[in-house]
């Protein structure tokens, strides 16, 4: 059969790389063919999600932050300083987390989706037009965030003025000075050229951009055991591949940015400098518990337990 | 203007007529709207027409106020109206779907009529019946699937991220707009069958500027 | 299947169906064929909504509204009087000023549709009065507004930059040369048009007369200040500038000039809503149609057959130009960029073409496409706003399309038109 797989990024970005590997694996191990639909070709993120729910698409990649409109609990990935900053711990978390492998699948199933995997896309960094070392530096800074209440609340707690802006206007707005900052993983800052219109990249370590791959539930349940295994194996192979691909991706992207713009200043905040940012996290947790749906508390607790398990505390 | 300068070449009268027409006040006078429906149905239809008009005007005004308020909020209060974009989305959907039936009512939908206009009267009349009937069918079908879409969205429970209200609330206009548009075209088809003239909509005769026509 | 769909659409269009019907029929046939029935028509509705949802589209009704208020009141005519005081005595002066105003407004607003309305709305009646033919006026407005895409900020270039991984700053700078070249060509054409058709000129205004014109235009000069100062000064996004213009226009016409009362305000808002609806339903239906083309991977199928990887750089550039030109005749420009750029990217790399040059050519083609029959969104907008028949709106177009295509050809042969400024700025 022909299976269709849509994702939120361009072909050469992380989600696209994952999808290409998945396609390669499935096509090598079965007679099925996979068509890939990158960002925008079948609509926006919410559109492709709905199409996966109605079975037009067999596979979809959507980041939990966007899924939050449908499954409020998924917004937990926007709570700052929850995911480990250490890459090895992070990978271990995604492999072993009970939250991801046991608590989330039924929530996705309620929406007609089979959760296949979640994986990290890279450390979220701030790009700004002036230096950021402490929350005080974000005072009066109009910072573009996605229209998500937790992101708004995070940046409010950091002291910035969160400014929702459609993605297409962000570049121009940074250039003319309507906004002075935005956040994204390094590869995305590089590929979307946000560094051209900002001067500082700050690694605050507050989050790692997470994304999830899902299948239409009826489609998945209707597969033969053999085909299910093909899908699961391909997901596992793509997961390993993407973790491997990512090792060094952040550094490589930052290197490309420095080559393209030597005047860029990249700062990694020390543990001590991060402290005042970390101190704002409980306020956002509160907010998450308010809007995170009926299972918010359970998810947050389990998430912390999972993290304790991987960090060996 | 120095067009009356005796030494200037005399402009083409067609061009002048176009210039006059371009400045003509093309507003639709809602109080002059006569429903194509008889009796109580006509009263309901005229009331719907009035509601559509008010929604159109209010939607546009609200959109301007909302957008500017966001700027004011950002600079004066240091706080963006984070739901501003979603409100504009809701308004544009409202405007579009209140507007398509209002446009159908007044024969304002864009069409390419060059070949149509060149046909003889009987052909044109027949074509107009077919066009109105096919358009009505398409609109009613979309109304049905739009309703289906709204119900599906309601069942899925998608929320608007900033406003935290169900997304289907802002799309309820969609099936309604398609339905009312479909009904207008269906009535137009009927009117063309029973009346001797050719009608673009139940209140607009073909070949006339509808602003002029409605003053009849 | 693709040709059956395109054929049906064109026939329905020519028969005089409301223009949303060919687009809806095209996507309907596609959906039924792709999904073996009506089971997935929900998604068609979803896509129609997706087409009208982008936040940046809000600028269109806002500029329509502002322009309508200005035109009904005094603001627009005072601004035009000011322009006329300086160029009214020159052959083709008003036409050249219109082209210039479209370039400037389009450059800043970034929206070709908003430009058609905001500049064309007030200037068209004046051009007609001055003796220009309507089909020339309409074609000039629609095509000059294309320049909006080439001069920064340009949403088309941003999307191209992201999808192809090309520097957006470099693209922005590269667009300026071709943009100005087009303006120059249009100006020269306008001059010869005015000479050949013997468009009358006004006597040269004296300096005192010019002084009066300036004084009368002081308040309305706030509009360019809001738009240009506001956007480049980092106060507004283009959408917000549009809304600010609405409020400023209301302030001028209701408070300062006292030209407008509540009743007229209501009528203007309603008329704006009506035009918006009529245009946006087409944008939405167009999006549903784009979805079908994209889902069925029709471009991939057609382009797979032409053997593009066997061509040299000129062949590739020519194929790209044709593909984008044809694609944009039927489908929304942004969608065309999203679908086509990844297909062409490997070939562009292989033959060693400068991605900035390719991006500039693509942006130009996309701009041309949005003003080209049968389904160009600028044409819809012009029909809705000016209430002129379709053929009237497109009749004067061929010379302009010819000039635009000439620019594209010149760009292919002399890439320096685009790259000169870029190389200067980025010291390459
Ligand atoms: Na522009
Ligand atoms: Na077009």
Image (spheres, rainbow, N blue to C red):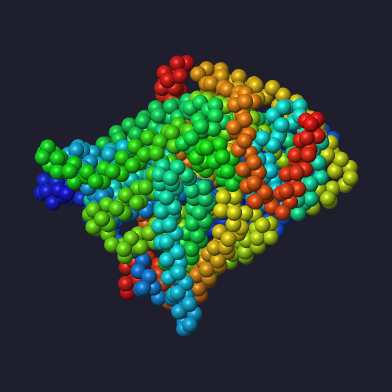
* Number of callouts: 0
Residue at x-position 72% and y-position 54%? A294
Extreme residue in the right direction: A225
**Does the rendering let one see residue C141?**
yes
Residue B111 seen in render: no
> Residue C68: x and y, percent?
33, 54
Q: Nearer the viewer, residue C285 or B196?
A: C285
Q: Up-down: is C255 above or below C80?
A: below
Q: Is B78 in front, or is C326?
A: B78
Judged from this view, the residue extending furthest toward the bottom is B39
Residue C127 drawn above or below residue C360: below
Relative side of A92 to B133, left or right? right
Question: Which residue lies at the image location 46% right of the left edge and 83% below the top edge?
Answer: B39
Percent across and percent down for residue C6 are: 57, 49
Vertical side of B38 occupied by A146: above or below: above
- Residue A118 vs residue B114: left or right? right
Q: Residue reaching furthest top?
A: C428
Quadrant of the rendered structure where residue A227 is? top right
Residue at horizontal 40%, vertical 57%? B61
In-image side of A50 versus A114 (left or right) = left
Residue B41 picture location, percent across and down = 49, 80
Q: Quadrant of residue B107?
A: bottom left
Q: Nearer the viewer, residue C41 or B124?
A: C41
Residue at 85% over, 43% down: A228
């Amino acid at each position: 059969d022909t299976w269709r797989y849509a994702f939120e990024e361009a072909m050469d970005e992380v989600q696209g790389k994952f999808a290409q590997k998945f396609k390669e694996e499935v096509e090598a191990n079965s007679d099925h063919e996979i068509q890939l639909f990158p960002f925008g070709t079948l609509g926006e993120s919410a559109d492709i999600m709905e199409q996966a729910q109605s079975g037009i698409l067999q596979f979809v990649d959507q980041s939990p932050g966007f899924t939050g409109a449908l499954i409020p609990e998924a917004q937990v990935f926007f709570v700052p300083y929850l995911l480990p900053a250490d890459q090895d711990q992070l990978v271990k978390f995604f492999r072993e987390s009970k939250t991801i492998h046991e608590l989330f699948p039924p929530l996705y199933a309620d929406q007609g989706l089979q959760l296949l995997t979640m994986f990290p896309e890279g450390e979220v960094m701030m790009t700004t037009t002036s230096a950021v070392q402490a929350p005080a530096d974000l005072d009066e800074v109009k910072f573009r965030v996605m229209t998500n209440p937790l992101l708004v609340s995070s940046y409010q707690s950091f002291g910035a003025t969160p400014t929702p802006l459609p993605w297409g206007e962000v570049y121009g707005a940074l250039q003319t000075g309507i906004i002075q900052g935005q956040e994204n993983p390094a590869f995305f800052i590089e590929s979307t050229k946000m560094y051209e219109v900002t001067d500082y990249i700050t690694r605050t370590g507050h989050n790692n951009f997470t994304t999830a791959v899902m299948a239409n539930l009826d489609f998945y349940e209707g597969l033969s055991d053999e085909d299910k295994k093909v899908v699961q194996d391909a997901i596992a192979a793509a997961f390993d591949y993407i973790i491997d691909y990512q090792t060094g991706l952040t550094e490589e992207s930052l290197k490309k940015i420095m080559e393209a713009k030597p005047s860029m200043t990249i700062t990694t905040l020390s543990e001590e400098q991060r402290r005042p940012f970390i101190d704002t996290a409980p306020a956002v947790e509160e907010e998450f518990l308010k809007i995170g749906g009926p299972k918010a508390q359970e998810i947050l607790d389990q998430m912390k337990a999972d993290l304790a398990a991987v960090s060996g505390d | 203007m120095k067009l009356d300068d005796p030494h200037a070449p005399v402009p083409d009268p067609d061009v002048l007529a176009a210039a006059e027409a371009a400045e003509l006040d093309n507003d639709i006078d809602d109080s002059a709207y006569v429903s194509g429906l008889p009796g109580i149905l006509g009263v309901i239809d005229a009331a719907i027409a009035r509601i559509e008009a008010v929604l159109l005007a209010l939607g546009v005004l609200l959109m301007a106020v909302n957008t500017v308020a966001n700027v004011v909020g950002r600079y004066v209060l240091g706080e963006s109206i984070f739901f501003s974009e979603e409100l504009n989305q809701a308004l544009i959907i409202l405007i579009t779907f209140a507007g398509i039936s209002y446009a159908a009512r007044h024969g304002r939908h864009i069409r390419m009529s060059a070949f149509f206009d060149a046909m003889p009267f009987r052909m044109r009349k027949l074509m107009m019946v077919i066009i109105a009937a096919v358009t009505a069918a398409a609109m009613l079908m979309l109304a049905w699937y739009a309703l289906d879409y709204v119900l599906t969205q309601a069942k899925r429970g998608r929320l608007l991220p900033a406003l935290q209200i169900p997304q289907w609330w802002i799309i309820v206009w969609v099936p309604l707009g398609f339905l009312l548009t479909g009904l207008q075209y269906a009535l137009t088809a009927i009117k063309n069958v029973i009346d001797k003239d050719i009608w673009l909509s139940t209140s607009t005769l073909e070949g006339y500027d509808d602003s002029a026509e409605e003053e009849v | 299947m693709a040709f059956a769909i395109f054929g049906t659409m064109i026939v329905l269009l020519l028969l005089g169906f409301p223009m949303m019907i060919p687009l809806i029929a095209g996507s309907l046939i596609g959906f039924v064929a792709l999904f073996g029935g009506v089971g997935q028509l929900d998604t068609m509705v979803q896509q129609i909504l997706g087409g009208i949802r982008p936040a940046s589209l809000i600028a269109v009704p806002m500029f329509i509204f502002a322009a309508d208020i200005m035109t009904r009141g005094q603001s627009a005519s005072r601004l035009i009087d000011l322009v006329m005081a300086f160029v009214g005595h020159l052959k083709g002066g008003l036409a050249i000023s219109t082209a210039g105003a479209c370039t400037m407004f389009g450059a800043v607003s970034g929206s070709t549709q908003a430009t058609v309305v905001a500049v064309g709305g007030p200037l068209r009646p004046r051009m007609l009065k001055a003796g220009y033919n309507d089909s020339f006026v309409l074609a000039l407005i629609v095509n000059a507004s294309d320049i909006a895409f080439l001069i920064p900020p340009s949403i088309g270039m941003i999307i191209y930059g992201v999808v192809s991984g090309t520097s957006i700053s470099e693209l922005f700078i590269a667009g300026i040369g071709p943009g100005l070249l087009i303006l120059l060509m249009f100006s020269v054409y306008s001059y010869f048009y005015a000479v050949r058709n013997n468009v009358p000129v006004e006597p040269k205004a004296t300096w005192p007369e010019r002084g009066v014109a300036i004084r009368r235009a002081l308040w309305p000069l706030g509009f360019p200040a809001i738009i240009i100062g506001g956007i480049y000064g980092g106060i507004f996004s283009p959408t917000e500038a549009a809304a600010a213009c609405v409020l400023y226009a209301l302030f001028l016409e209701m408070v300062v000039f006292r030209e407008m009362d509540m009743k007229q305000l209501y009528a203007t808002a309603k008329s704006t809503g009506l035009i918006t609806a009529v245009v946006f339903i087409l944008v939405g239906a167009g999006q549903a149609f784009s979805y079908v083309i994209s889902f069925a991977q029709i471009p991939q199928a057609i382009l797979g057959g032409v053997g593009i990887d066997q061509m040299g750089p000129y062949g590739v550039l020519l194929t790209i130009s044709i593909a984008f030109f044809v694609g944009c005749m039927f489908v929304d420009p942004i969608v065309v960029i999203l679908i086509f750029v990844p297909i062409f990217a490997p070939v562009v790399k292989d033959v060693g073409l400068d991605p900035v040059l390719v991006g500039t050519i693509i942006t130009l083609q996309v701009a041309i496409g949005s003003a080209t029959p049968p389904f160009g969104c600028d044409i819809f907008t012009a029909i809705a706003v000016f209430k002129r028949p379709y053929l009237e709106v497109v009749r004067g177009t061929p010379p302009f399309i010819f000039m635009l295509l000439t620019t594209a050809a010149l760009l292919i042969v002399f890439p320096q038109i685009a790259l000169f400024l870029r190389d200067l700025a980025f010291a390459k």
